[in-house]
Image (cartoon, rainbow, N blue to C red):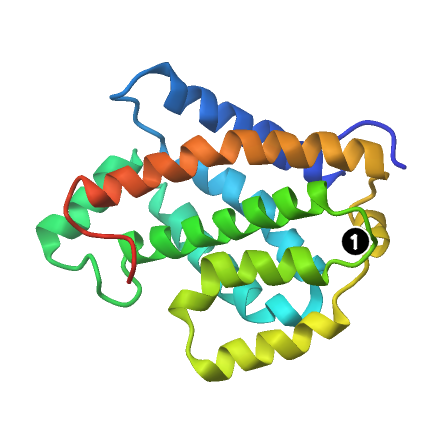
Amino acid sequence: MAEGDGDRTLPRIAEAFKDLASVVADSQSAEVKVAPFSHACALVSPLFGCLGVAFKFAEMDYVAKVHDLVEASKSIQSLHSLIDLDVRGGTVKKGGSHTRNLLRVKRGLDMVRVLFEQILVTENNSLKDPASKAYEQVFAPHHGWAIRKAVAAGMYVLPTKEQLLKKLNEDEASAKVHMQSYVTASAPLIQYIDKLFVSRDLGIDW
């Protein structure tokens, strides 16, 4: 295992989301900035690649939409402002809008949260059950039959938990700590983003 956390994905993700969660916890009127949010989301991107063909669709979609948010952060300060700009422009649900991309990125974060939760309570070395549950809970309701079938086939060629941890340069003990940290930190952030949508009567199921 590498010395230090600099070149390791999980500790960097855990730390970045812990920082975001502390902003959300500070007050009810807290505003999450687009720049640190998009930076934290970009750290998650390699995880999708590590999961192989089953989540190739998610990797391509997620990476592109995080890139859009990174670009948006150069001119838009907060997630509040990002959504409000689209609301005023009447472009919230338009393909490629920042708000639509934020919703898709949020789903990616939620999928990883559920995946980590399931890995933490699963004793065996297979990722099939954790990944299947995460997909079914977060992505499947928004996908057509063809994508769901392709993902189901991809579940049979997922890496094992041991192979995943090796790719991430972690042992099981360290991985559990960082995964739990992400699960704990990401939950209030995901709820915060959901509230941004619901409080504006935009809904989150589109």
Question: Which quadrant is home to the N terminus?
Answer: top right
Q: Nearer the viewer, residue 44 or 179?
A: 179
Q: What's the residue at 55%, 30% (across, down)?
A: 184
Residue 131: x %, y % from top left: 64, 59
Quadrant assignment, res 100: bottom left
How would you rate the neighbour count of disc 1 (Cα within 10 Å): few for under 14, some for 14-19, many for 20 or more?
Answer: some
Residue type beneath disc 1: Leu
Question: Which quadrant is home to the C terminus?
Answer: bottom left
Q: What's the residue at 35%, 30% (across, down)?
A: 32
Residue 153: x %, y % from top left: 66, 79
Hey, which residue is sitting farthest right in the picture?
A: 1
Hey, which residue is sitting farthest top in the picture?
A: 26
Image mark count: 1
Quadrant assignment, res 181: top right
What residue sits right under mark 1 in the picture?
164
Q: Is residue 29 left or right of residue 60?
A: left
Q: Secondary structure at mark 1?
A: helix
Residue 141: x %, y % from top left: 40, 66
Q: Is residue 75 visible?
A: no
Q: Is residue 39 left or right of residue 34?
A: right
Q: Is residue 100 left or right of residue 156?
A: left
Q: What's the residue at 65%, 47% (across, down)?
A: 118
Q: Nearer the viewer, residue 179 or 123?
A: 123
Give above or below for 40 relative to 140. Answer: above
Q: Is residue 15 visible?
A: yes
Q: What's the residue at 81%, 27% (across, down)?
A: 4
Give above or below for 182 relative to 25. Answer: below
Give above or below for 122 relative to 129. Answer: above
Residue 71: x %, y % from top left: 39, 49
